[in-house]
Amino acid sequence: KVNDVGILALGQRTEGVNGKRRDNLRFLDITFCEHITYGATLELRKLLPSPLLVRRQPRWLDGHFETPFSGRHPIEVHTYYPDGSFSFDRDEQAAGYVARLFKRSDDSNRCSEHHLADKLQYIDFRANGWPNWTRFAYRPGVSLRRVPDEIIKDQTTGEESILRSVLVAQNRKGFRPPTSFPALEHIDKVPLGESRLFSKEGEMLARDVEDDDNQVIMVSRMKVVPLSEQEMIPPIELTDRIDAFVSEMNSTDIPDNGEEVVHAVLGGHGLEE
């Protein structure tokens, strides 16, 4: 299993063929390599003489996600880069990186690369009176399902384009990602650019339903605008902020059960991984 030590070795100066490989390294795909931290990819990039495109997630998770959350115009856009870093179009809880990405089982009970769950590490979470370590243990997650691309034809020009979208499901309480949501059937139940509430049994609920017992799941369908070639490497301002956050996190004493404590305080019951 490749770990942080293994990828950092790629950046070490050596003579001969290995040295040339280091100098020519431009792309590194470590998708689903759970033993490699985001912080290690930052350290590797510092060791290399040229920019490095790191991929820590499937391509269908790259892009500008047009969310239905804000209820305003322009809409709130969430941008995810290939290395898992992200930047959201809002004032708080607006930047960070995907700390973990893992596969869910599909209908045949096999792990699927089209049904995933994640943990997001925000770098700007405000503890608001909580202990400082909670800034690093607050890692909310969602479950995601790839929607097959659609061909859209412009009624005026007749030109065709590809519509990409993703289903995103999250529990209304706590921050663990749902296990069995979103399902393929939600493609027809959740309109593009909107959200719907469901019980854990799959029944669609009223939009203003209360969630007193952690039984309500929100499913959204978001259009995804692909990144341009120039956007594949995240902005240096973002990675510098993440680098500073990771350094602080590594020097902070965080309880072993820190995530579970924050999850429970936020109304979550049990772990849904």
Image (spheres, helix red, strand yellow):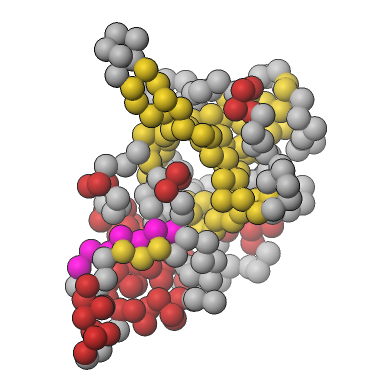
Residue in front for this viewpoint, 204 or 18: 18
Q: Is residue 35 magenta?
A: no
266 on left or right of 199: left
Q: Position of residue 38 (x, y in %)?
A: 43, 64
Extreme residue in the top direction: 156
Q: How many marks?
A: 0
Does the rendering let one see residue 134? no
Q: Position of residue 243 (x, y in %)?
A: 35, 64
Q: Position of residue 221 (x, y in %)?
A: 53, 29
Residue in front for this viewpoint, 64 or 130: 64
In magenta, the rendered stretch is: 50-56
Q: Is residue 85 above or below residue 195?
A: below
Residue positioned 30% across, 79% down in the render:
11
Q: Is residue 150 above or below residue 138?
A: above
Residue positioned 49% across, 76% down in the render:
3
54 on left or right of 193: left
Residue in front for this viewpoint, 156 or 169: 156
Residue positioned 54% across, 77% down in the render:
1
